[in-house]
Image (tube, rainbow, N blue to C red):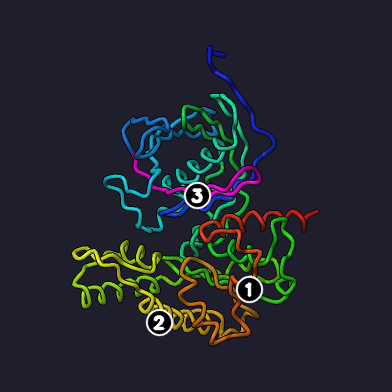
Amino acid sequence: MPKGKKRMTIKPELNLAIDAGNGTTCIVSEQGQALVFPSVIQQVEDIRLDGRGSQGFTIHISRQNAETGDYQDRKSFAVGETANLLPGLKTRITDKSRIGSEYQLTLILAGTVKALDALIDNDATEIKASVIWWLNVPPIYYGFAGKLYDLAGCYQVEYNRRTYTLNAKIGHVYPEGAGAAAVYMLDESGHFANPQFATGRTGIVDGGYRTVDSAIFEGPVLLENSAQSLTNSISGVYHLMQQWAMQEFGEDWTEQECEAHLRNGYAVLRESKERVDLADWIDDLGSRLADLIEADIFQKQWNGLGDVDRVILAGGVSYMVAQHLKERYPAVIHLREEYPHTQNVPYELMNAEGHMRLLKAELQRQS
């Protein structure tokens, strides 16, 4: 072994639930703390930041050829550590070709080595590990989920002055929203935290800032053909905000600014620097979004709620629609505040954390 090289093999096989989104990558493992970091990627030309640059770090990836055993197709990617976009990068493209693409693979590998790096407390420079990836994909692309299973293989990744040799398997690919439902239904050990969810059908509405996703569980089992997405919901909200901002303030807000203002609940005007409260706007927009969810999911997808016994509301925009839908269906809608055991899981981690709980529930059924 060359001088200064120290090798380490991580055992046993590690389960990693990875929610690799366009904006944020979330990692939950059976060991260590959950990780959340901006998943901003741009291909670069042999630039190695070694984890020290303020604009990001660089990972170098090569995949093993199954026939020759050689590692090939070495590429370099800068992965943003801050919320600032790297030059030339568009993070909002949702082309179907990205599912199973090198972009998606790089998000997953970046999350994997960051998780492993956080777990390792020694000066080893060569790390070997076997991992099982538990992944998710937006329901709008769920028909392409099979491509993610093709990402299983052997990889070498250089990150933070270490070389990682990874043997990766795919445990399961879930639609987004399934993990959020699991956080409501299951505790950290994979047992039902709420016995009522053990029978009948539970519908999940996961309100994200780009799509509103839905799926149905029958007891603890996901009905995979039930996964669907609304794509016009949030874009319609942004369009209205843009119209109102121009009419009331003379400001031309981008979709990213609309998203930020919704998250904050207020906006700071560019010219006057006045801070304006958007509570009334959010209430109005929430009512309109609740109308869309009721019409397109409750009535059309779920046959006037005849296909489900109860509905869980989750996701970052659920606060906008929660009270509106609860008022209309008080016995059907289940809100997060009604289940204290969900409070220790941040919104962004619900899918990844839920996937880990689904894994534990599956192992219990098999034992």
**Residue 89 place in picture, x, y as percent:** 30, 48
Q: Pointer 2: what residue?
A: 288
Q: Is residue 351 magenta?
A: no
**Residue 232 place in picture, x, y as percent:** 38, 73
Q: Residue furthest top?
A: 3
- Per the image, label 3 sits on a secondary structure element best described as strand
Mark found first going from the N terminus, 1 or 3: 3
Residue type, mark 3 in image: Val
Q: Which mark is residue 239?
A: none
Q: CA distance from mark 2 to mark 3?
A: 31 Å
**Quadrant assignment for the N terminus:** top right
Q: Pointer 1: what residue?
A: 338
Magenta segment range? 26-43
Secondary structure character of the magenta stretch overall:
strand
Q: Find out whether the residues at labels 1 and 2 contact each other: C-beta distance under 8 Å.
A: no
Nearest the viewer among 29 and 203 is 29
**Residue 313 place in picture, x, y as percent:** 55, 73
Mark found first going from the N terminus, 2 or 3: 3
Quarter-wise, where is residue 5 in the image? Answer: top right
Q: Pointer 3: what residue?
A: 36
Residue type, mark 2 in image: Arg
